[in-house]
Image: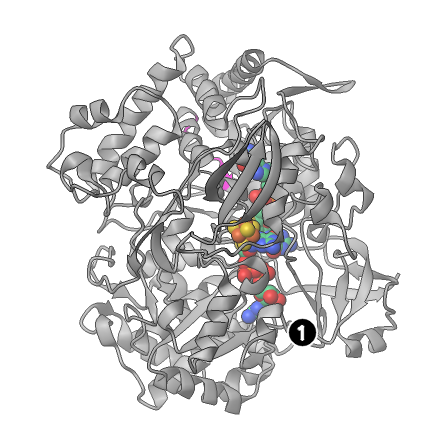
Amino acid sequence: MTASLTHRACTLCEATCGIRVTTEGRRVLRIEGDPDDPFSRGHVCPKAHALGEIQSDPDRLRTPVRRTPAGFVPIGWDEALDLAAERLGAIRAAHGVDSIALYRGNPTVHDAQSLLYWNVLQKALPTRSQFSAGSLDTWPRWVQAGLMYGGFLHTPIPDLERCDYLLILGANPLVSNGSLMTAPGIKKRLQALRARGGKLVVVDPRRSETAEIADLHLAIRPGGDAAFVLALLHVVFAEDRIALGACAGRIAGLERVREIVSCYAPERVAAACGLDAGTIRRVAREFASAPRAAAYGRMGASVQRFGTLAHWAIDLLDITTGNLDREGGVLFPKPAVSLAFVGPKPGEPTPLGRAKSPVGGFDEILGEWPMAAFAEEIESTRADRIRALVMIAGNPALSAPNAARIERALERLEFMVAFDYYVNESTRYADLILPPTAVLENESYDVALLHFAVENVAKWSPAALAPEPGMRPIWRTLLGLSKRLMGLGALGDEQVDGLVVRQLAPALLEQSPFAGRLGLDAIVAALGDAPGPRRLVDLMLRLGQAGDGFGLVPGGLSLARLEASPHGLELGRLAPSLPESIRTPSGRIELAPERIVADLPRLDAWLAAGPEPALALIGRRDIRSMNSWLHNLPSMAKGRDRCTLEVSPADAARLGLREGEGARIESRIGTLVAPVAISDRMLPGVVSLPHGFGHDRPDTRLSVAARRPGVNANRVVDDALVDGPSGTSVLNGIPVRVSPA
Ligand SMILES: Nc1nc2c(c(=O)[nH]1)N[C@H]1C(S)=C(S)[C@@H](COP(=O)(O)OP(=O)(O)OC[C@H]3O[C@@H](n4cnc5c(=O)[nH]c(N)nc54)[C@H](O)[C@@H]3O)O[C@H]1N2
Ligand SMILES: Nc1nc2c(c(=O)[nH]1)N[C@H]1C(S)=C(S)[C@@H](COP(=O)(O)OP(=O)(O)OC[C@H]3O[C@@H](n4cnc5c(=O)[nH]c(N)nc54)[C@H](O)[C@@H]3O)O[C@H]1N2
Ligand code: SF4
Ligand SMILES: [Mo]
C-alpha cells in the first residue's frame, strides 16, 4: 500500500493551523505542521496528534445508536432518522414547535458542514427554544459589538504584526491558541512584538502562561476588568489624551462617555480591582501614547459578572486612543467567506430582546435564549415547556453552570436526539445518538473562524480519509432529518440540497459585491449538481469579497482556486475599512448604547460593596484539552493530573490545605472535592479549577476518560449569576468556600 499526503487545516481550536497528514489505507501515519502554510508557517500544538487518535478511538460511535432498557444498541441510519422525525413530529403536533429545543455546541463553529446544515435544520424546526454554547462564551462580545458597530460576528481584531502595545485582558492565548483572534503560532507573534520593542501587558488574576512572557502582569481581582478599563478611560479623558483617528466624525455618544468615565477615577476602583491607582494611571498613559496599541479581551473578560461592560470599555479604549481602524491597532477583517448574511442587514438593529423567555424572562439574544434559561424551561409545568431536545456537538452536563440541575433537566425530556461522537455525560440521556464522521474524514472551510483572523487568509481542507464504511457525513444526516420534518421525506437528498442552494444563494447575493450583476439561475447552474458542503462553500467564496463573481472577476476566489492552493492563500493584511464596517442604524459607531450603559449601576454597587470575603473561583485551560471532549484520547489524557484546585501559598497556609490532598469546594449550589495544587501563580483570594472534567457518570462510554475522571467544576458554578445585558452565564469569579476535605 502506498502512503498518501493531504494538506489541510486542523479544526480542533480557533488557530486553524495548516497540517500535513500522511495516511496509508485507513491508517494515519503522521500529522505534522505544514511549513508552507503562509498563515501558520508550520506551527502545531500537541492536539494536532489527537486528530489521528479520534480516528482510531474504539469508544467513538460508528453507527447510530438507540437507547433501550439494556443500554444503547445500534440502529440503521434511515430507521433512526424516521424515528427521530416521527417522535419530534408528534411532540411538535401536540405541543407546538417551541416545545422542541435546539442546542448547538462549540465544535460546530469549527466545521462548515455542521454549521451550514444545522442552519437547514433550524429552518425545518423554527423553534424559539434555541440555545448554544455562545451564552457560555462569546455573547458579551457579540452584544457589545453588535450595539456599537451593528451586525453580527463583526468585531475588530488586534493587528498583531504591527502593534506596539498589546493589552490582553482575561485571555491566555499561549494555552488556548487564541480566541476571537485567529492567530496560529501566537507565542512567536507575541515574542516578535516584544522583539521589535513593543510591550505586552496581561491582566489576569492568575500568572498565566501568557502573563509569564509579558512585560507587565496585572493580577486583577476577578470581575474587575470593566472598572479597570473605565479607569484607564478616566485618565485618557481627564488628561486630554483623546485621539479619535479614523473614528473622528463617525461616532455618536462621546460626551455621554466623558460624563460616565469621569466617575471612575483610578483611586475609586483600585481596591475592588486589587490594583494600585498609580499603576492604572501609568498603563493609561502608556497605552494612549503608544504609536499603535490594541486592547483585547476574551473569556476572563467575557464570562464574568460584567462581561458586556468590560468589552464595551475595551473597545472604547481602542476608539478614543485612535487605535480602531488603524494599522497596528484593531481592524475589521475582510473574510473571503462572510457569515454576515445570517445577521441583520447593514442599517438594521442587532437582534436583541425581541422576545422574553417564558419562565425567567431572559431577553432573546441573536435568536436564542441563554443557557441560564435552559433547565428552567424544561422543569416548568407550563403547557409550552420544552419537552424535546435536538443537540449537536454539545455537552451541557459538563459545560453549563449548575450541572446537577442540567442533568435533572435532561433526564426529564420526553425525547432527545444528539449528533455526537460519544456516549458521554450529556448524550447518555439521548434516545438516539447519530454520530458524525471523524475530523480527518471531513472536508471543510473555516467559515466562522476566519472572521477573526489577524490576516485575511483562505484555505480549503480536503478530507484526508474516506468515511468509514457505513458512516454518513453529518450534512447528510442533518439534511435527512430536516427533509423528514419538512414533509419532504420522499425527495432524494440531491433534490433537497438543490432547494438549500436556491434558498441560500439569494441571501448571499444580496449582500455580495456582485449584487445586481448576477442571476440566480446562472449561479445555480455554474455550481453543478454534486450536493453537500463543497457546493455551498464554493457559492460563498465566489460571491464573497475576494470571489470570482462567477466569472466577473477573473482570478478571484472559487473552490477550484483554493483546491489548487493546498497550503492556503494569503489575501493581504488587515486594513482600515471605515466607514463600510459601520452597520448601525445611525451609520455611526454608538459609543454609549443604552442597553450597556444601563448596566453601570450594577457595577457601581459592586464597587461600593468592596472586596468579597469569599474566595473567587475561576477556570483554567490546558494545552492538551479542548473543553470536555479530548479526554478519551490516550495522548491527551496522559501526564500529571490536571483537574486540580490551584491555590496560592498564602490561602493554602491560611486554610490548612496541603499539596495533593483533597480540598472541599462549596458554593451556593453544590460541593466538590478536588486535589490541591499550591501555586504561586494564583492571586491570594482566587482559586482555579478547569472545566470539562467529571467523567464519572454511569452509562457513558468513555473508557480512557473514566480512568481519571476529575470533577465537574460546573457542579459549583452558580447558574443564578449572569451578565445583565447579554444573559451570559458567569463562569469566572464564583464565590466559594474552600476547606481541607
Ligand atoms: N487547549 C485548549 N485550547 C482551547 C480550549 C480548551 O479547552 N483547551 N477552549 C477553546 C475555547 S471554546 C475558548 S472559548 C477559548 C478561550 O480562550 P482564552 O480566553 O484565551 O482562554 P482561557 O484559558 O479561558 O483564558 C481566560 C483567562 O482569564 C483569566 N481570568 C479569569 N477570570 C478573570 C477576570 O475576571 N478578569 C481577567 N482579566 N481575567 C480573568 C483566567 O485566569 C485565564 O487565564 O480557548 C479555546 N482554546
Ligand atoms: N466552568 C466553565 N464552564 C465552561 C467554560 C469555562 O471556561 N468554565 N467554557 C465554556 C466555553 S468557552 C465553551 S465553548 C463551552 C463548550 O461547551 P459545549 O459546546 O457544550 O461542549 P464541549 O465540551 O465543547 O463538547 C463538545 C461535544 O461535541 C462532540 N463533538 C466534537 N466534535 C464534533 C463534531 O465535529 N461534530 C459533532 N456532532 N460532535 C462533535 C464531543 O464529543 C462533545 O460531546 O463550555 C463552556 N463551559
Ligand atoms: S493550535 Fe493545536 S489544536 Fe489549534 S489548530 Fe493548531 S494544531 Fe490544532
Ligand atoms: Mo468557547
Q: Position of residue 245 (x, y in %)?
A: 24, 76
Residue 532 drawn above or below residue 168: above
Q: In which quarter of the view is residue 583 placed?
A: bottom left
Left or right, 403 with reference to 107? right
Q: Is residue 143 above or below residue 250?
A: above
The reply to whether the magenta stretch includes residue 159 is no
The majority secondary structure of the magenta stretch comes to loop
User: Dot 1, crowdedness within 10 Å: few (<14), some or many (≥20)?
Assistant: few
Drawn side of residue 60 relative to residue 263, left or right: right
Specify the quadrant that holds the N terminus: top right
Along the viewing direction, whichever of 728 and 245 lies nearer the viewer: 245
Estimate the x, y position of residue 229 in percent, counting from the top left: 45, 76
Task: Please name the residue shown 84% across and 73% down the image.
Answer: 655
Residue 474 is situated, as x and y percent measured from the top left of the image, at 50, 27
Hey, which quadrant is residue 274 in on the image?
bottom right
Vertical comparison of 113 with 90: above or below: below
Task: Tell me the element at label 1.
Answer: loop
Q: Amino acid at mark 1?
A: Glu
| Camera-nearest residue between 499 and 161 | 161
Which image quarter: residue 683?
bottom right
How far from the left and from the top, in percent, is residue 104? Answer: 51, 38
Badge 1 is on which residue?
612
Q: Residue furthest left?
A: 517
- At 44% from the left and 75% from the top, the residue drawn is 193
> What range of the chain is rendered magenta?
125-131
